[in-house]
Amino acid sequence: MNVKGVSKTGLMTILFNQHLLVPRFGSQPASPNARLLADQEAVALQHLDVLEQLFEVKLVVKSEYAIYKDLRLFLVAENWNSTQIDIQIHFAQPLAVSQGMERDEIELMVKDEARELFVAKDSLTMVNGNFILKQPLDR
């Protein structure tokens, strides 16, 4: 996995390095490449709690402005297919992001319990979650 980038509107695209099986979400029709999560009903993609269920997220504030050290954010999964996942980043204070000389960064790591959601289509193996995705955030 790697982060393709974060748009000015906060849309972050994470690309997969291989085709993955896509979990079936409540608003999607069943397909041969979709699968339900074990012991769970399908939920709408937009109701998936990205911070709680998928990723450990850390915001690295590099701004020298102390007033902006508490940048709160929440994430919404917008699209998930076999090659990528698009996540919308919402900041409580979007104008405070990356206001210093150095750009702030977002770091994501797949939670251990979420690894079952990231399964390679060909080998049916879970992706290794022992890595951190880092992405600078634009002003």
Image: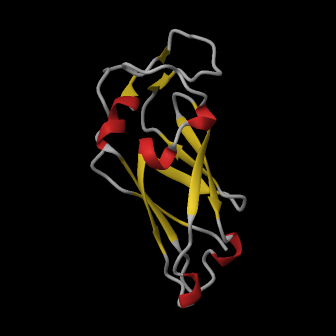
Residue 100 drawn at (x, y percent): 59, 86
Q: Name which quarter of the figure residue 53 lies in.
A: top left
Residue nearest the observer in this picture, 15 or 97:
97
The relative height of residue 99 versus residue 139 in the rendered view (above or below) is below
The relative height of residue 60 versus residue 10 in the rendered view (above or below) is below
**Residue 99 can be seen in this image:** yes
Residue nearest the observer in this picture, 109 or 120:
109
Query: How many numbered circles does the render carry?
Result: 0
Q: Quadrant of the N terminus?
A: top left
Residue nearest the observer in this picture, 17 or 94:
94
Residue at (53%, 74%) from the top-left corner?
A: 104
Residue at (60%, 46%) from the top-left corner?
A: 76
**Residue 79 can be seen in this image:** no
The relative height of residue 38 versus residue 105 in the rendered view (above or below) is above
Residue 103 drawn at (x, y percent): 56, 77
Residue 71 drawn at (x, y percent): 56, 72
Residue at (56%, 23%) from the top-left corner?
A: 25
- Using residue 16 as the reference point, say whether residue 8 is left or right of it: right
The relative height of residue 52 versus residue 102 in the rendered view (above or below) is above
Residue at (30%, 30%) from the top-left corner?
A: 126
The figure's colour scheme reads: secondary structure
Residue 124 drawn at (x, y percent): 32, 20
Q: Quadrant of the C terminus?
A: bottom right
Residue nearest the observer in this picture, 88 or 138:
88
- Using residue 112 as the reference point, say whether residue 66 is left or right of it: right
